[in-house]
Image (cartoon, grey):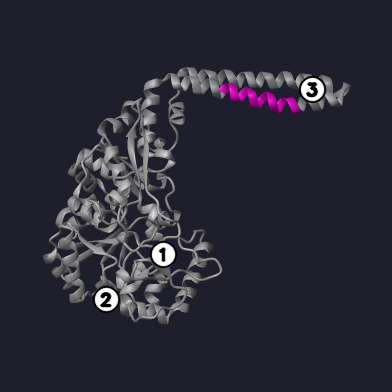
Amino acid sequence: MSNDPGCHRLPLDRYPGMNPFVLDWLAGDERFLPRKPAGKRTRTIPAALAEALIESNRRWGLNVERQVRQFAAGETFTIIAGQQTGFAGGPLYTLVKLATLLKMKREHEPATVLFWLATEDHDFGEAAALAIPRRDSAGQTDLQWLRASRPPDSREVVGRSVIPETLIEQLTAALKIDRPAWLRRGITFGDSFAELMTSTAGDGVILVDSLLPELRLAGAPLFASIATKWNEMQSALAARSTELERAGYTPQIVPREGEGYTLLYQIDQQGHRDLLHRPPSLDSPWSISTSAITRPLLQDSVLRPDVFVGGPSEIAYYAQVAPLHALLDVPMPRIALRGHVLVAPRKCVRYFSRFDIQPPEVFTTPERIVAVHAAEGVIEVRSIAAKAERDLQAQIEKIRALALPADHAVARAINRSIGHIEYHFRKLTERAIRGLVRKDKERFHAARELVATFFPDRHVQDRVVGWFPLWCEYGKLLLDRIVDEVEPDSSSFKIVSL
């Protein structure tokens, strides 16, 4: 743990819900996923794709021509990460992922940073939801969810869908801000996300739209290999999944019930994404859409990154699809875990030292935190309760000893009553303790604020809380602070003050 009162380092196994495979992998278990690629890597990007990258980034306000030329010629170390194009930038971990890329770029100059925009996803419910911190009338923090919906059977890709006006109105009203240009009327989720990233990261990143026709055309040889080896891929995935299960892990991807694993989709002219149950015709490769299984293969076959930076789920995906790289002769990059950073105002982070609260405690409840630091009254109540319960048990045993020879029915009634007495006695004790806990108002207030900030609604902050509201308050300091503190490929995570 850091000595800096504004920064706390914790072991990643204390991060709630951390994937056990990733923890073992970080500790050196490379049975299913190597840490370093095998052999030397070469890269030649088709000219049409390079021009498309330059032009698409220019539309979003980025001038990346020089970076794209260097990247396409194979002259730079290349790092890539990706994310669904969620409303207003999505959860905090999206910004942390970007910060991880920028931190790694510092360490590998000259380097090219690519950010893959997963515009082809059709999970509208996930993309069109955002949680933002909100203070209630009592000054306590909670979450406000902004949401929009569409018919559940819709298969339209989210990246090309127009952001609903109601969602934009919810955000601007909640944050009390003017409507930004990246939320102008009629803008799509993909363009909005890209323009927000542009205003955040500047020219340090090349954005890659997964729906670029030129990217799909460059992937035509891969799609042909997938079509040819469709059944072999299914068998390889099933075998790897069995290996993972035997090792005690839960495979990240499961086959469709009664069918195989989802490999590809096809996008029609209306932008609807439909599952392909069999090898596709390759007359129009620009209409092919990848799944969670084949997206890494398209990325690695066409862009040839040196390092892929992913979250825990993405690392687990790679472990499951790793056999497909060899099967399809696609070079695998080095895999790196994104950093994990939680953030809060400096005043909030100072509660740790002020009230002697240990950072891992925030992943419990305010009552439990304060109970750990119980006042003497709580300790005394527990002591009295324990003694009273022992005395009660002793007196009951005396009654049992007297009643048993005389009346077995009385003895049975006593046995039934013992459980009720113990239950109600302990409930009364815990109620008294909770009352005493709440008497320590300052510590309880601090504990409640810490839990609401870092573990809202029993979810870790970076998984659900949007980063844009924090950007509205702290601006570029937010990204700079995370870049300074983030630790890529680390078995630790950090709590950082702003």
Q: Quadrant of residue 46?
A: bottom left
Where does the image place residue 173, in percent across and percent down from the top left? 28, 38
Question: What amino acid type is highlighted by mark number 1?
Answer: Ala
Foreground tag (2 vs 3): 2
First in sequence: mark 1 vs mark 2 = 2
Q: Residue at x 25, y 33 (%)?
A: 346
Q: Which residues are magenta?
A: 416-429
The residue carrying mark 3 is 400
- For the C terminus, give its image quadrant: top left
Predominant secondary structure in magenta? Answer: helix
Q: Quadrant of residue 466?
A: top left
Farthest residue, direction right: 406
The residue carrying mark 1 is 319
Question: What amino acid type is highlighted by mark number 3?
Answer: Arg
Residue 29: tell me if it is visible. no
Q: CA distance from mark 1 to mark 2?
A: 25 Å
